[in-house]
Image (tube, helix red, strand yellow):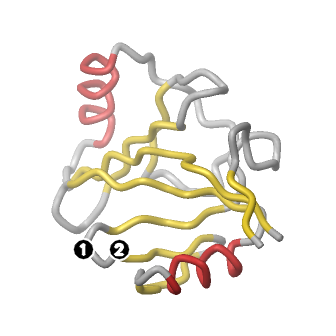
């Protein structure tokens, strides 16, 4: 048995200046920029302030075309990836601690570790 839920909305930006992009999205969404405490993701991410019961929102500097993608957090990444593959998703790439996937409809998304306090947040789904 494992758990998963929508965790994050990632705004992928193909830009030179990530700070400028993050300032735009901060103002557009009415969310102040947040100082990153956990820098394991590197310098390509700038988080916005969100409440604990809301998805994490981050602005990410990327090399591919700009888009928005979502993250699904799970307490068992491999089990969640297998579940999503059974639904028709494709595993594209494992990166550090997460897996990039593609939905049957073409959207990319990631399966990631729990983001807040090391636990999958409230309202998680339970899967057998």
Q: Position of residue 21 (x, y in %)?
A: 25, 36
Does residue 110 appear to the left or right of 14 in the view shown?
right
Up-down: is 25 above or below 105? above
Determine the secondary structure under disc 2: loop
Determine the secondary structure under disc 1: loop
Does residue 8 appear to the left or right of 59 in the view shown?
right
- Residue plotted at (23% across, 26% down): 24
Q: Position of residue 126 (x, y in %)?
A: 75, 59
Counting labels gives 2
The disc label shown at residue 58, or none: none
User: Gap in Å between the C-alphas at discs 2 and 1?
Assistant: 5 Å
Tags 2 and 1 in contact by the CB under 8 Å rule?
Answer: yes
- Residue plotted at (24% across, 74% down): 106
As drawn, the residue found furthest toward the left would be 65
Q: Which residue is mark 1?
A: 106
Query: Quarter holding the N terminus?
Result: bottom right
Counting other residues with Cα less than 10 Å from the Cα at mark 2, is it few (<14), some (14-19), or many (20 or more)? some
- Residue plotted at (31% across, 42% down): 18
Q: Position of residue 69 (x, y in %)?
A: 35, 55
Does residue 17 appear to the left or right of 81 in the view shown?
left
**Of the pair 124 and 47, the residue shown nearer to us:** 124
**Of the pair 77 and 17, the residue shown nearer to us:** 77
Up-down: is 90 above or below 29? below
Counting other residues with Cα less than 10 Å from the Cα at mark 1, is it few (<14), some (14-19), or many (20 or more)? few
**Of the pair 89 and 22, the residue shown nearer to us:** 89
Up-down: is 123 above or below 85? above
Q: Position of residue 105 (x, y in %)?
A: 25, 72
Q: Which residue is mark 2?
A: 103
Query: Quarter holding the C terminus?
Result: bottom right
């Amino acid at each position: 048995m494992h758990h998963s839920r929508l965790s994050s909305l990632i705004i992928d930006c193909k830009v030179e200046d990530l700070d400028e992009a993050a300032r735009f999205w901060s103002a557009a969404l009415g969310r102040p920029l947040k100082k990153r405490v956990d820098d394991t993701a590197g310098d390509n991410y700038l988080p916005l302030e969100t409440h604990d019961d809301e998805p994490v929102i981050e602005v990410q500097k990327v090399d591919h075309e700009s888009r928005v993608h979502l993250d699904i957090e799970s307490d068992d990444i491999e089990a969640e990836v297998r579940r999503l593959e059974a639904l028709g998703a494709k595993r594209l790439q494992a990166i550090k601690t997460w897996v990039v996937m593609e939905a049957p409809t073409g959207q990319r998304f990631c399966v990631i570790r729990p983001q807040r306090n090391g636990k999958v947040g409230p309202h998680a789904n339970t899967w057998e």
